[in-house]
Image (cartoon, helix red, strand yellow):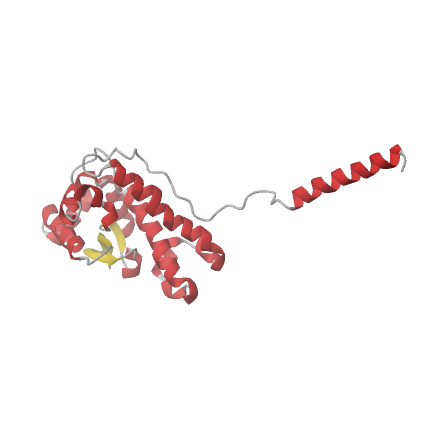
Amino acid sequence: MNRRDTLKLLAGATAFAGTATILGRPAAAQAKPFTLAPLGYANDALEPHIDARTMQIHHDNHHAAYVNNLNNNADKWPEMGTRPVDEILSNLSSVPEAVRTLVRNNLGGHWNHTFFWELMTPGGAKAPAGDLKSAIDGAFGDFDKMKAQVKAAGLGRFGSGWAWLGVKDKKLVVFSTPNQDSPHMEGAKAVIGVDVWEHAYYLKHQYNRGAYIDAWWNVVNWDKAAANFKKAMA
């Protein structure tokens, strides 16, 4: 083989290797259907009512696990990443049975936690105002009586779950859901919701769920709650 033939052979091999590299690698990484949004505030922003370590673990580990589970199993039912979340959670019977529990737990957990983070804020108003206040007074008597019902719902939830103030049939109602079930599954639209899983409070309050709920009222974003109420009543 002369020098010219050798150079041609080497050039061809190099070109083939480059092509193989391109073909063996996707042109762009496929986007994952679910993402974990950052908190809208620092982990310690809700101190002393909710401690920074709890916020960090709760968001970066517990919530992240639901997002990872959804992305890792999205190929089992691709519609979970394309259909509106509210629509799926409101009609779980439309979800294939093989993935229904996975969707219920993880999509419910993802929605619940996203709602929860957005519902809290440092230094916000301490009570509702406007239409939401009027609706609470009309449905429960006053703000304190509504708080007492939400607390009772949270304390009465055996094991893990959530306590909610929501709108059902155009009326404010208080209820709780087990595990990561969302208000959609109860035919309701959430106005406020408090996570009563132990991981939401155990580092600071240990077994005292009631003390955690009492402290949580200090960080509720009542502007967001008012927007949730307006949307629910539309």
Q: Position of residue 110 (x, y in %)?
A: 35, 50
* Residue found at x 25% / y 47%: 199
Q: Residue furthest front?
A: 1
* Residue found at x 33% / y 47%: 62
Which image quadrant is residue 47 in?
Answer: top left
The answer to whether residue 89 is left or right of residue 163 is right
Q: Is residue 62 visible?
A: yes
In depth, the one of 128 and 220 nearer the eye is: 220
In depth, the one of 169 and 192 nearer the eye is: 192
The vertical placement of 148 against 15, above or below, is below
Position of the N terminus, as image quadrant, is: top right
The answer to whether residue 84 is left or right of residue 47 is right
Q: Residue furthest right?
A: 2
Q: How many marks?
A: 0
Q: Position of residue 15 (x, y in %)?
A: 75, 39
* Residue found at x 42% / y 62%: 99
* Residue found at x 32% / y 42%: 59
Which image quadrant is residue 53 in?
Answer: top left
The vertical placement of 219 against 65, above or below, is above
Q: Position of residue 177 (x, y in %)?
A: 24, 58
Q: Is residue 192 visible?
A: no
Q: Position of residue 120 (x, y in %)?
A: 25, 40
In depth, the one of 223 and 61 nearer the eye is: 61
